Image (tube, rainbow, N blue to C red):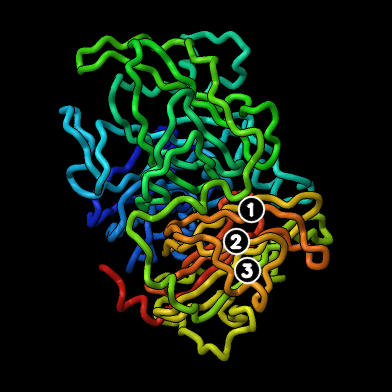
Amino acid sequence: MLVNGQFPGPPIYVTKGDDVVITVHNRMETNSPSAIHYHGIRQYGSVASDGVPGVTQPLIQPGGSYVHKFRVQNQSGTFFYHAHAGMQDDTIQGPFIVYDDENSWPSSLGKQLSDGPFTYDDERIIHLSEWWRQHHHQRESYYLGPTFRFDHSAESILINGRTINNPLQIMNPATCPGYTALNVEPNKTYRFRIIGGNSFRTLALAIKDHPMTIIEVDGEKVVPYETSFLEITPGQRFSVLVHTANAEPGSAFAIATNYRYRHRGKGYTENGFGYMRYVAPGPGGKRPPRDFTYAKDFPVFPEEDGVGWIWDKLQPLQGRDQILDEQPDRTIKLRASIMKHGDNTTRYYMNGRPPIEHALPLYNSLTRGLRKTPRLEELEEDGYSAELKTYPLFYQETIDVVLQNAMGGIDCLLHPWHTHGHSHHLIASGVGEYNHEEHKDIRNFATPLYKDVSVVYPSEPDPVTRGCGWTKIRIKADNPGYWAIHCHITAHMLQGKMAVFEESPDLIEAFSVY
Ligand code: C2O
């Protein structure tokens, strides 16, 4: 499955404040209805362009099309678009880059680029993804059907769509162009935009002998932080500054990946490699040929996985948002547990409820204006509306959401949760089971980041409830619409690990940008 014949799909470049119109044509085979989401774009006043089938739009049937129209407001940085249907995001995805202003647009004229306080010579995209050799329909029916036992890892980890599946095999350069090579010049500063298009595994990424300074996380600038490696869950993005050495043109430095938290294996993924290749400076500079030379000397990853990575050390550049010092109006706990049905199928239940299929998109011309914000008293204790089958939010509320892991079978897994329509502040996390009375005031991030994916790390299970780790995020309900919140491991989302925040539906019309 390709976008405009390409994988990764063609990058989309816009400037903050732009009005964007994208027409998605579904040219796939008969049983692959689709929808495209712009991950991390908050879609203020344009919920109908968010790309979540059944929630913000109908599925686009083969032969059909859908027009997305949105204004990219108050955000710039590194995003991506991806299919939001079945397992199509294995390969239907591509970068979506928002430049702060004209000064950050790369040009070939050799002028310094700048983004806020950061300056650099040029930028490159590192788009990570996983590649399964199975047909996406087969993968989908495995996850949803009776033979599902556990998640299967991908055969390959791709960097910008490439790898050598078996690095030990001698390849024919005529048929396999090999690993991705990022060309760089000596003595320069590059901004690498790293996109977590991986849809299952959490990956560590490092470049041999080149430390990285993180300057952006999920489309928000951060206080520069130097690290030897990144931890990238599905859906996360980073920008890092990398200074190149005074190295000879032709020299190469390995970019390597490693699994985090599960199946760490021998210290590297089997084939998730690329390399950074030095070329002579200047437009006429000699380019070494693209060949199979790759640096076999790999960067070293830490021996142990530190749970929580460096999330307590990163700080937003913007400073502290005042909503962090408020008391939340409500706290909604979303507890995902795995259920085996009588017919042997496996589903995630959110707060004990089976996954629901919304018969009609919540937002379309038929239902627009027909859904009313309920009263608080009409909601169940956990904030759910049995009538609407969503979690209603009230305009201008400050909401804390607790994402609770629970043991499913033998393992407690890591789960990256993504919020549509809002970025959120990561305010707390803990082990075992979240208990509101006991844990409501825990704040273990001194300087909460504002981002759109937050991780629930695995922990020892609570002996009674089997809860095995939680994370608390804060959202300001300032964007009326229907917003998905889900685990960004695609198979888990498919199995039901998702909820919908229905935010003041009667205000959607009034807030609409168009
Ligand atoms: Cu990138 Cu709903 O996802």
Q: Quadrant of residue 75?
A: bottom left
Among numbered discs 3 and 1, the one appearing first in the sequence: 3
Q: Nearer the viewer, mark 2 or mark 1?
A: 2
Q: Name the mark on residue 457.
A: 1
Number of residue marks:
3
Among numbered discs 2 and 1, the one appearing first in the sequence: 2
User: Does the CB distance between marks 3 and 1 fall below 8 Å?
Assistant: no
- Asked which secondary structure carries label 2, the reply is strand
Q: Nearer the viewer, mark 3 or mark 1?
A: 1
Among numbered discs 3 and 2, the one appearing first in the sequence: 3
Q: Name the mark on residue 321.
A: none
Q: Amino acid at mark 3?
A: Leu
Question: How much space separates mark 2 and mark 1, taking CA atoms?
Answer: 9 Å
Camera-nearest residue between 238 and 496: 238
Query: Which residue is identified by label 3?
Result: 334
x%, y% of residue 180? 44, 23
x%, y% of residue 140? 65, 46
User: Does the CB distance between marks 2 and 1 fall below 8 Å?
Assistant: yes
- Asked which secondary structure carries label 1, the reply is loop
